[in-house]
Each structure stands twice: as C-alpha cells, then as structure tokens.
Amino acid sequence: MRNIWFTIYSSTKYDDKYIGLNNYRTLLEILLIPAIQDKINREKKVQKIMLDLFPDLENDKVEYFRELFYGKKPYEGIVNISISTKGIDWNSLSEYERKDFLIEKWKVLFNNLSEDYFVTDKSEVIASLDELKNKDWKITSSPFKRKVKYNKENYSVVLDITTERAQLALVRDSDNKQFVLRNFETAQIHTDANFKGFQLDGDTLTFVYKNAFNTMFGSPVAFNLREIFK
C-alpha cells in the first residue's frame, strides 16, 4: 500500500526565515509514517497531508480548513492547512522548541479533521504525536541487507539521519566500530543518498544510484577503503 506523504510547505521567498526547516521536514516525512499512517482511514483517498507555513498570516486558518475537509473527501487526495508563524523566530529556536512547534501544528491539523478520517479514536493520533515530540528525532537504518566483505571482515552499510545531517557509514561486525564515509544534508537524502546497491572492486567501494538522473548528475559515491580504514 502506498505511503501517505506527510510534509511541510513554505515559499522559497521565506527561506531566510526558516533556516534548517528542510531537514526537519525530510526527517518528519519519514517519522510520521509509522506514527500516524495506519490510523488514517484509507477510504478517504488521502495521498498527502501538509502544513503550509506563512509568516505574515495572523492566525492558523482553522475555520477555512474545517470548511474544506470536515466530513468531506479531500480534493485530489490533498489535506493541507495554512499555519501562522507570525511572532515565531524559527531561526532562534532550540531543537526542542522547533520540534514542539511543528508537532503542535500537526496536532492543530489532526484535531480539526472529522472522525471519519481515522480508523482509531482521534485521541490516539494526538497521543502518537506527543510521544514523537519527546523522542530523539533520529533514524538509523541499513539500506541494504548485503554486507560489505573486505579484508576478511564484514561491514554493515548504515545511514544515520538527524535534524542536522545524514551520515553514511560502515559498521564493522566484529567490534561495532563505525567508519564514516560521507555526510549529507538531511534534506538531500532522497537524491544524494538514493542508492539501490553497492559494488566492491578491490579497495574501491561504489554506491549505485536508483535512477539514471542521479548517476549522471549526482555527487561522487566511490570510496577508497584503504584510506577509510587506515
């Protein structure tokens, strides 16, 4: 079943007001799927749920949101609410304050959807959001089941994602020691770290992109393991 896309929109003309927001957005797009997705009623044909941020808006457009969606199916599968950030200096907020702000705004959206959008009680959705707010916003996963076998040692490929960066590393099975290969902007993981596999040729470990566009225009993804392990 196709994942629902939970995302955040802000106009590029406000980029200087929301420095680092793209990293939070990308990480939340992943975190909200296991937290919320299974609680959404699929019969509503929801494809994307979105916060639209506006620094000049006086208040969240709650009444307009309810007019559009309360008891109704979303047009073209999109559920979105206009959120005011007036008086909020995003750039000066701490990480916890940013997490608190974003989760509270997601709660505004879900609190104002009618019950027919959910397969559980709405309170369970809100509780899941509160639980997420108090967790570390970090994802550590291995994009491949296959191990890298080099000099009689096995290594897992690990992608570690936070609100600050995404880090590609090898973790040695024998002692769990980590060897960092490269750091990415979290917001770029779906392009710069969009790998389908890897190839090992002698000392050279090369990661293979999922599509031709990345292969042609993406950043180099070949590593000399002799240098990495020295």
Image: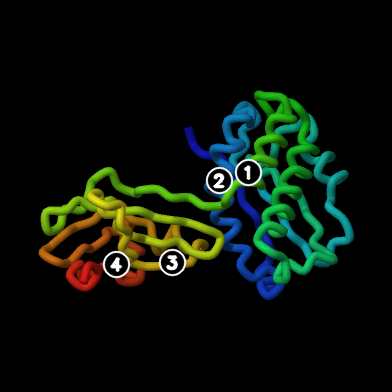
Sequence-wise, which precedes: disc 4 or disc 1?
A: 1
Q: Nearer the viewer, mark 4 or mark 1?
A: 1
Sequence-wise, which precedes: disc 1 or disc 2?
A: 2
Quadrant of the image occupied by residue 94: bottom right
Examine the rendered structure and indicate whether residue 23 appears above or below residue 136.
below
**Which residue is the site of mark 2?**
31
Q: Is residue 15 left or right of residue 193?
A: right
Do the residues under discs 1 and 2 have CB atoms within 8 angstroms? Answer: yes
Residue shown at the point (55%, 45%) measured from the top left: 31
Q: In which quadrant will I find the C terminus?
A: bottom left
**Which residue is the site of mark 1?**
132
Residue shown at the point (60%, 58%) measured from the top left: 24
Q: Nearer the viewer, residue 217 or 200?
A: 200
Distance in Å between CA atoms under marks 4 and 2: 26 Å
* SS of the residue under disc 1: helix
Please tell me how crowded label 1 is: few (under 14), some (14-19), or many (20+) other residues with Cα within 10 Å: some
Sequence-wise, which precedes: disc 3 or disc 4?
A: 3
Rendered location of residue 193, percent (x, y): 38, 60
Sequence-wise, which precedes: disc 3 or disc 2?
A: 2
* SS of the residue under disc 3: strand
Rendered location of residue 212, percent (x, y): 31, 61
**Which residue is the site of mark 4?**
221
